[in-house]
Image (cartoon, rainbow, N blue to C red):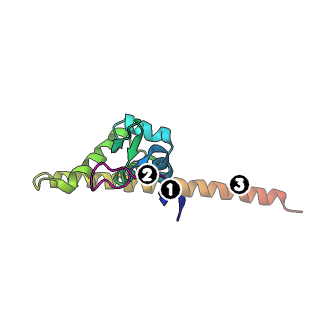
Amino acid sequence: MPDALRDTGPQHSCGPAAGRLMQIGEAADRVGLSIRTIRHYEDAGLIVPSARSEGGFRLYTEPDLDRLAVVKRMKPLGFTLDEMRDLLGVLDALPTADPDDRPALLDRLGMFHTVATARVTALREQLAAATGFADTLRHQLDQHTSPR
C-alpha cells in the first residue's frame, strides 16, 4: 500500500461521516503542500481543520484535503485569496442551495470557469513562447559546439 494511504496511527472521529482524521504533516504530504502553506491558508480563512486533538494538533479529513486541492489548483492560475475564498463559498453552498439561490451560484461558478479557462490559455501561450526560446538556445548550442 502506498505510504500516503497507509494508516499510520490511531483513528479519530468527530462524527460518523467525518472519516479518518490526519495531522497536518500527513495532510501536507497527501496534498503536496507545505505545512507552512496550509497554516497560511488557515490564517486566510480558506481552510479550517475539522477537529483538533487533545494536544491541540490540527486534524484534517478527506473533504478538507479536497478543499486544499482546489486552492492548490487555483494558485498557479493567479487567483487571489479573496477569489479563492469566494469560489470555495460557492462550492460549499451549491449542494444545499435553495432553488432560488442556485442560478446566482451557478453564474458565479461559470464566471470562475471562464476566468480559469482564459488563464489556462494564457499559460499555454507563455509555455509555447518559452519552449520556442529554449529551442532557439538549443539550436545555438548545437550550431556552435558542432565540429567544423
Q: Say whether residue 37 is left or right of residue 12.
A: right
Q: Which residue is mark 1?
A: 125
Q: Position of residue 99 (x, y in %)?
A: 11, 56
Q: Amino acid at mark 2?
A: Pro
Give the number of the mark in front: 3 or 2. Answer: 2
Q: Which residue is mark 3?
A: 137
Q: Secondary structure at mark 2?
A: loop
Q: Is residue 80 above or below residue 15?
A: above
Q: Main secondary structure of the magenta part?
A: loop
Q: Secondary structure at mark 3?
A: helix
Q: Amino acid at mark 1?
A: Glu
Q: Position of residue 127 (x, y in %)?
A: 54, 55
Q: Which mark is residue 20?
A: none
Residue at point 52%, 53% (across, down) = 126
Query: Which quadrant holds residue 51?
Result: top left
Residue positioned most to the bottom: 1
Residue range (magenta): 8-20
| Local crowd size for mark 1, using a 10 Å CA cut-off: few (<14), some (14–19), many (≥20) | few
Q: Which residue is mark 2?
A: 10
Q: Position of residue 69 (x, y in %)?
A: 41, 52
Q: Amino acid at mark 3?
A: Leu
Residue at point 49%, 45% (across, down) = 25
Q: Position of residue 91 (x, y in %)?
A: 27, 52
> Quick one: label 1 or label 2, which is nearer the N terminus?
2
The answer to whether any part of residue 47 appears in the image is no
Residue 13 is inside the magenta segment: yes
| Local crowd size for mark 3, using a 10 Å CA cut-off: few (<14), some (14–19), many (≥20) | few
Q: Quadrant of the C terminus?
A: bottom right
